[in-house]
């Protein structure tokens, strides 16, 4: 894995000085509806940032702008030293090679085995040799605790297992940043634990993560920073104990009802 | 009604009509296989093109598909064989038949594959894009395999219909099965028998075609093999 030379590990600078992801006054409209109304925040190397907020507040849209699934209207996002801009294109391929994303609905490729799901992108995008790609698949599957499912098809797995495979598939590209969009929301309650545990392990392992979540207990335990979004804006920001001492009435109300 | 069935003309020593049947069958098989292979390629290309970002390409394909699906195959053949000939483009009856069948089946194939492509969930495409796959890689690795797997039964059905429709190529005197039958009937006056024979041959060909597709699905789609999803 080629570490991108923007934040040499040897320098004693605080992470904040060289963010992995930085939103610079990002606006995003769908047609005439402005969904993001000027967002700015930064995610340092190794940080875990949780986006919380009501449904429709723009959390998913913000996340999807990072890897260009949605094109921003104005402003810019710095991602691993590359600029995501309103004109799109430019560095998108470079950004996508460095950023992994996991969705609420898993989105595994149904016609491929677990192993093929994982090896597809390394082989096609990074031209990794087949044997090496298989070793990589074994490696990331072990990380998510699913080594025995390597030959299964997605439809043979439970939702929690599919989501862990989706995480493994993203990890196989050896990303520098991982994005998670409500990855436990589609799961039965008894299956969320296994997925949250994988994410917690990743966070402890130093992965830079931006996640949209409704798991407030998880956010309060794992997040380095919590960002409360409200009506397309960053409404309140704080460390992981933010939820126990909200300052704005909106967050107080969200904490009161949203749990 | 005491009609005497008599199939003996088939192996009449002077005029072994079974050879003509066999020859006609072989030509029908050739027409069918060629049109399926070429028509599938053209149809898949059109299906891909109809998802392109170029509006004029999408429109051109839509016009082609609608014209073909809303006019008789016979008109299309005659137009190619007689119409173009009068402009100086001459085809043999066999080439005209293959061309007409290809152009015809490709339009249906295009629509069927397009419906398969549209059934691939948007999330899978976003996942592939997010992993950095190019548009072509996305198409060939993520979109087309499940799309074609899903529509294979419809495709097989359409191809069988096309195989049966090769019988109208007798109209431009392609010596396929139906043309052979007509000639034998006019020489032997054994219409009752000969068309039973021909029907049985078409039935056998249709069965063989369906079986081939079932085998193709089994060979090309390992998930079906593993999970036993019926074709
Ligand atoms: N593709 C789209 N087209 C139009 N509107 C959209 C689209 N995606 C999201 N929106 C709208 O943008 C707003 C924010 O959506 P989203 O980012 O999904 O919110 P959240 O993830 O916080 O629930 C919502 O009002 C939603 O209806
Ligand atoms: Mg959302």
Image: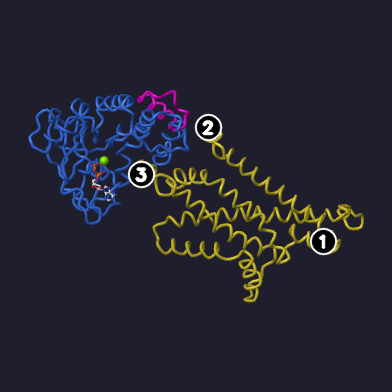
Chain colours: A blue, B yellow
Residue A151 within the magenta-colored segment of the rendering: yes
Which residues make up the magenta segment?
Answer: A133-154
> Where's residue A207, x and y in %?
26, 30
Residue drawn at (48%, 65%) of the image: B63
Q: Is residue A143 above or below residue B162?
A: above
Q: Earlier in the sequence, mark 3 or mark 2?
A: 3
Residue A60: name its quadrant.
top left
Single out the mark in the foreground, 1 or 2.
1
Q: Chain of mark 2?
A: B
Q: Chain of mark 1?
A: B
Total numbered badges shown on the rendered structure: 3
Q: Earlier in the sequence, mark 3 or mark 1?
A: 3
Single out the mark in the foreground, 3 or 1.
1
Q: Which residue is mark 1?
A: B185
Given residues B36 and A95, the one toward you in this image is: B36
Give the residue at the far front of this rendering.
Answer: B1
Element marked by disc 3: helix
Distance from Cα at disc 3 to Cα at disc 1: 61 Å
Quadrant for ligand 2 reads top left
Q: Which residue is mark 3?
A: B126
What is the crowding at mark 2: few (fewer than 14 residues within 10 Å), some, or many (at least 20)?
Answer: few
> Is residue B98 something one can see in this rendering?
yes
Element marked by disc 2: helix
**In the displayed structure, does residue A204 sit left or right of residue B89?**
left
What is the crowding at mark 3: few (fewer than 14 residues within 10 Å), some, or many (at least 20)?
Answer: some
> Is residue B6 something one can see in this rendering?
no
Q: Which residue is mark 2?
A: B227
């Amino acid at each position: 894995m080629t570490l991108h030379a923007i934040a040499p590990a040897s320098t004693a600078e605080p992470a904040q000085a060289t963010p992995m992801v930085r939103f610079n006054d990002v606006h995003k409209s769908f047609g005439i509806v402005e969904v993001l109304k000027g967002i700015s925040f930064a995610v340092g190397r190794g940080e875990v940032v949780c986006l919380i907020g009501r449904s429709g507040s723009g959390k998913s849209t913000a996340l999807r702008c990072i890897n260009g699934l949605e094109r921003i209207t104005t402003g810019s996002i710095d991602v691993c030293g590359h600029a995501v801009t309103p004109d799109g294109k430019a560095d998108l391929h470079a950004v996508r090679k460095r950023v992994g994303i996991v969705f609420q609905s898993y989105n595994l490729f149904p016609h491929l085995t677990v192993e093929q799901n994982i090896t597809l992108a390394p082989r096609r995008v990074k031209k990794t040799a087949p044997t090496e790609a298989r070793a990589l698949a074994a490696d990331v599957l072990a990380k998510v605790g699913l080594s025995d499912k390597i030959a299964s098809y997605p439809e043979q797995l439970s939702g929690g297992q599919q989501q862990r495979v989706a995480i493994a598939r993203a990890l196989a590209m050896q990303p520098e940043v991982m994005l998670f969009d409500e990855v436990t929301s589609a799961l039965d309650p008894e299956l969320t634990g296994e997925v949250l545990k994988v994410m917690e392990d990743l966070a402890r392992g130093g992965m830079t993560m931006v996640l949209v979540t409704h798991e407030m207990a998880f956010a309060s335990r794992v997040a380095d920073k919590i960002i409360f979004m409200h009506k397309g804006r960053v409404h309140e920001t704080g460390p992981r104990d933010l939820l126990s001492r909200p300052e704005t009435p909106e967050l107080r109300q969200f904490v009161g009802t949203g749990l | 009604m005491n009609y005497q069935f008599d199939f003996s003309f088939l192996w009449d020593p002077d005029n072994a009509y079974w050879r003509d049947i066999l020859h006609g069958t072989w030509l029908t098989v050739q027409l069918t296989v060629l049109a399926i292979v070429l028509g599938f390629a053209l149809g898949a290309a059109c299906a891909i093109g109809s998802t392109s970002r170029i509006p004029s390409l999408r429109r051109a394909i839509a016009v082609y598909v609608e014209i073909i699906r809303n006019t008789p195959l016979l008109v299309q053949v005659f137009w190619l064989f007689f119409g173009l000939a009068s402009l100086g483009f001459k085809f043999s009856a066999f080439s005209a038949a293959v061309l007409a069948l290809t152009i015809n089946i490709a339009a249906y194939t295009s629509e069927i594959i397009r419906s398969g492509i549209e059934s691939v969930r948007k999330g899978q495409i976003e996942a592939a894009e997010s992993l950095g796959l190019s548009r072509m890689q996305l198409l060939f690795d993520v979109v087309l395999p499940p799309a074609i797997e899903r529509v294979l039964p419809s495709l097989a059905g359409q191809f069988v219909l096309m195989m049966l429709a090769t019988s109208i190529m007798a109209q431009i005197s392609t010596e396929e099965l139906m043309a052979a039958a007509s000639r034998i009937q006019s020489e032997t006056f054994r219409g009752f028998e000969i068309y039973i024979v021909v029907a049985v041959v078409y039935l056998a060909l249709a069965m063989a075609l369906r079986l081939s597709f079932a085998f193709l699905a089994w060979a090309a789609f390992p998930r079906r093999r593993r999970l036993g999803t019926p074709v």
